[in-house]
């Protein structure tokens, strides 16, 4: 059975910045095909729940009031990669649009809801290390 990293918020853990989760319909079917390794790079990096929303601006993650959260996001990304290496996971199912987990499109850094091309910090590190990335919008491709 293959191993897959999965964003904890998609599994129902209320670990998002606002203290909620984003359980995704049908995600429980993954356990029939994969060993699931839950991750939350933001929490694992030391950020509390709830916490101020962060956005990616270049290589930095900042809050609306300008607080720099980059170190915690990077620490969480490194821990996600470590979990992948320790468990042999070559696939990750991550929360779309997130500044840590977003794949291909993330919030544009303006706090207006706009989007831009790019990856979150954890997604970027996982991709650089050969992990295949998917979001909840790609669930059918994994099943």
Image: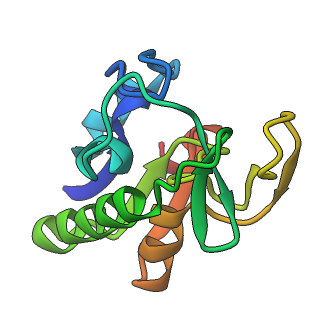
The total number of labels drawn is 0
Q: Residue at x 30, y 41 (%)?
A: 43
109 or 117, nearer to the observer:
109
Left or right: 53, with 13 as reference point: right
Q: Position of residue 121 (x, y in %)?
A: 51, 65
Please state which of residues 133 and 13 is positioned toward the viewer in this rendering.
Answer: 13
Q: Quadrant of the N terminus?
A: bottom left
**Residue 35 appears in view:** no
Left or right? Give the position of 115 relative to 19: right
Query: Where does the image place residue 46, in percent across and percent down from the top left?
Result: 25, 46
Q: Is residue 31 visible?
A: yes
In the image: residue 124, left or right of residue 11: right
Residue 104 placement: quadrant: bottom right
Position of 17 relative to 37 (above/below): above
At a point 57% along the width and 38% down the height, the residue shown is 136
Q: Is residue 22 above or below residue 96?
A: above
Front one among 71 and 43: 71
Instruction: Residue 105: name its quadrant.
Output: bottom right
Pick the front one: 93 or 32: 93
Q: Give the residue drawn at x 52%, y 31%.
A: 52
Residue 124 in the image, given as x and y percentages of width and height: 53, 72
Horizontally, residue 27 falls left or right of residue 120, namely: left
The answer to whether residue 21 is above or below residue 122 is above
Colour scheme of the picture: rainbow
x and y, in percent, of residue 106 in the image: 72, 52
Q: In this view, which residue lies farthest toward the left?
A: 86
């Amino acid at each position: 059975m293959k191993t897959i990293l999965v964003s904890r918020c998609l599994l129902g853990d209320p670990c998002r910045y606002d203290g909620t989760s984003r359980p995704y319909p049908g995600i429980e079917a993954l356990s029939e095909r994969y060993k699931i390794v839950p991750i939350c790079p933001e929490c694992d990096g030391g950020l509390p729940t709830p916490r101020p929303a962060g956005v990616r601006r270049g290589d930095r993650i900042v809050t609306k009031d300008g607080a720099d959260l980059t170190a915690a996001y990077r620490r969480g990304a490194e821990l996600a990669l470590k979990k992948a290496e320790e468990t042999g996971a070559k696939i990750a199912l991550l929360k779309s649009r997130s500044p840590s987990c977003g794949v291909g499109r993330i919030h544009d850094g303006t706090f207006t809801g706009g989007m831009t091309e790019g990856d979150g910090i954890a997604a970027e590190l996982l991709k650089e290390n050969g992990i295949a990335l998917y979001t909840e919008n790609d669930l059918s491709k994994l099943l």
